[in-house]
Image (cartoon, helix red, strand yellow):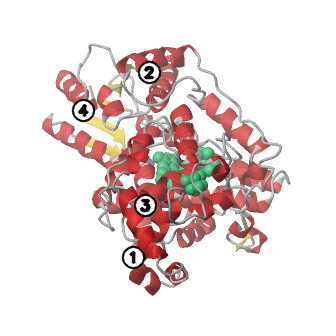
Amino acid sequence: MRQLILLLGDHLHVDAPALQSFDPAQDHILMIEAVGEGAHVWSHRARITLFLSAMRHYAAGLRAQGLPLTYLTLSSPEFAGRALCDRLAAALVAWRPRQLVMVEAGEWRLAQQIDATAAAADVPLRVLQDPHFLCSHEEFGDWAKGRKRLLMEHFYRVMRRRENVLMEGGEPAGGEWNFDQDNRKSFGRKGPVNLPQPRRFLPDEITRTVMAEVAAVFSDHPGSLAHFDWPVCRQDALAALEDFITHRLAGFGTHQDAMWSDQPWLWHSLLAPALNLKLLDPREVIAAAEAAWRAGLAPLPAVEGFIRQILGWREFIRGTYWLDMPGMAQANHFGHANPLPAWYWTGKTHMHCMAQAVNTTLAHAYAHHIQRLMITGLFGLTAEIRPDALADWYLAVYVDAVEWVELPNVIGMALFANGGRFTSKPYAASGAYVKRMSNYCTDCRYQPEQRVGPQACPLTQFYWNFVAKHEAVLAAEPRTALMAKNLARLPAGELAQLREEAGQRLARLDTL
Ligand SMILES: Cc1cc2nc3c(=O)[nH]c(=O)nc-3n(C[C@H](O)[C@H](O)[C@H](O)COP(=O)(O)OP(=O)(O)OC[C@H]3O[C@@H](n4cnc5c(N)ncnc54)[C@H](O)[C@@H]3O)c2cc1C
Ligand code: SF4
């Protein structure tokens, strides 16, 4: 065997880079399902199902092309082993390929393990750059060089110019790089109106088989499979893209930060899982959004806001992961040490905002960005939860979770655990924010404005406790000085009571 091509679960590219110089007469493809990958963190059953179903659909496409492929299912006896690398090691020993070829992994841990496995088997490993991304590690490293703080907005402008996206005569379309001031609206009392329901992709036979296997092998894992309807192949992914562009893109911007009870999707694209598996190319997603604006089908603020997420945030976040690993995984700027409350896995909490975000997550393996950042993430920050514990939770529970995108979002964005490496301030807020951006507080046992007493909103109480603890640092930074200043406005004596109660609650987060 000349080359053994290892195709990982999130490497389901349209034109697989590792197959570019493929010779069926002397090369072979290997795809591995491994129990260990589903159990490395306590993965949601829908997350495992998505990966395995998408892999099996992809494998069917390779077989239809007549390409030589060995596909190891969870239960296939060939090259048995729980860990992906145990199965790989056995294949390397049996086949002795002259070279192992793969596209760069999406996770530092796996990259190290595969490297070590190939070395132990004495098989040279060739790692190909992933052409899915618009910015390579080298390009991001060059951009980041010499910058103490990495700001997405600067990176985004470079990418807009370089890729010539939403540009007119060398200037940003509409004269602004960023239309976020138009994109922060709440729904008002009536809630979302004319909400389009996203297209569903009901499980086909392959997916149903995977669901049954996952339910059996991962029977004690969290999350429901009852609502599984994610796109699992290229055709579905393209249909999901079209559905978003046609029905939700125009409304994407306005209520991007808003939340509403029992409305998990709103105007979000739901494209992250298909993108992260590489079933969609970010270039085609960006081009489709820009074309919709040019055709007058969606307003510029919505389209710019959406494109910024893909061309800006997604590429930026990936750059920071590879730049700062492995240290990023251990970052704990505030030294937070609280364990993750058990209700993150059950949704059984009296805080209605948390129950909404967690229950949506358990039902669909999805929560939209603002729920992740400003509900479960915000709580993690001010409730002083250990960053690695919360990061493991995020990696486990979302269909789109791959560590290169999950970890920087948790460590850098939600928790400020890397000390502001790429955020200019911690995303700390009180229950007043949740009240403004959602209807969650109307159904809650707690009161968002109340700072002390049994009905005090835990988010409000923890927020002021956080500000009081870090008052000096917050006061010294222009973007957070107001937080510290407002602390002085609390009624005399209240702060001591608030901190006392917050301390008691922080010691029993499970009961909130
Ligand atoms: C704590 C936390 C954890 C997160 N974990 C993940 C994760 O594991 N996987 C993941 O793909 N995204 C993650 N995100 C980013 C974002 O929340 C999700 O990409 C988004 O919610 C997915 O839903 P959507 O496809 O409907 O996105 P939309 O709201 O429709 O956004 C459009 C697209 O932009 C991209 N995008 C938006 N925001 C970000 C961001 N901050 N970082 C990278 N890409 C972004 C995604 O590809 C997304 O599909 C996380 C964010 C936070 C705050
Ligand atoms: S009152 Fe506090 S805990 Fe309850 S929903 Fe509002 S923000 Fe969440």
Instruction: Decide: is 92 above or below 319.
Output: above
Question: Which of the two residues, 92 or 311, is positioned nearer the viewer here?
Answer: 311
Residue 202: % across, % down: 63, 22
Q: Secondary structure at mark 2?
A: loop
Q: Residues within 10 Å of mark 2 (few under 14, many from 20)?
A: some
Instruction: Decide: is 128 above or below 64.
Output: below
Q: Nearer the viewer, mark 4 or mark 1?
A: 1
Q: Earlier in the sequence, mark 4 or mark 3?
A: 4
- Residue occupied by mark 3: 381
Name the residue rendered at 19%, 21% in the picture.
Answer: 94
Q: Secondary structure at mark 1?
A: loop
Task: Tell me the amino acid under the disc marked 1.
Answer: His
Real-space Cα separation, disc 1 to disc 3, in angstroms: 13 Å
Left or right of 124: which side holds 372? right
Q: Is residue 466 visible?
A: no
Question: Which of the two residues, 49 or 238, is positioned nearer the viewer here?
Answer: 49
- Residue occupied by mark 1: 470
Tell me: is circle 1 under 8 Å from ligand 1.
Answer: no
Real-space Cα separation, disc 2 to disc 4, in angstroms: 23 Å
Residue 264: % across, % down: 64, 41
- Residue occupied by mark 4: 85
Which quadrant of the rendered structure holds the N terminus?
top left
Q: Earlier in the sequence, mark 1 or mark 3?
A: 3
Task: Tell me the amino acid under the disc marked 3.
Answer: Leu
Task: Tell me the amino acid under the disc marked 4.
Answer: Cys
Q: Secondary structure at mark 4?
A: helix
Q: Nearer the viewer, mark 4 or mark 3?
A: 3
- Residue occupied by mark 2: 67
> Disc 3 vs disc 2: Cβ atoms closer than 8 Å?
no
Question: Which of the two residues, 472 or 80, is positioned nearer the viewer here?
Answer: 472
Q: Earlier in the sequence, mark 4 or mark 1?
A: 4
Q: Residues within 10 Å of mark 1 (few under 14, many from 20)?
A: few
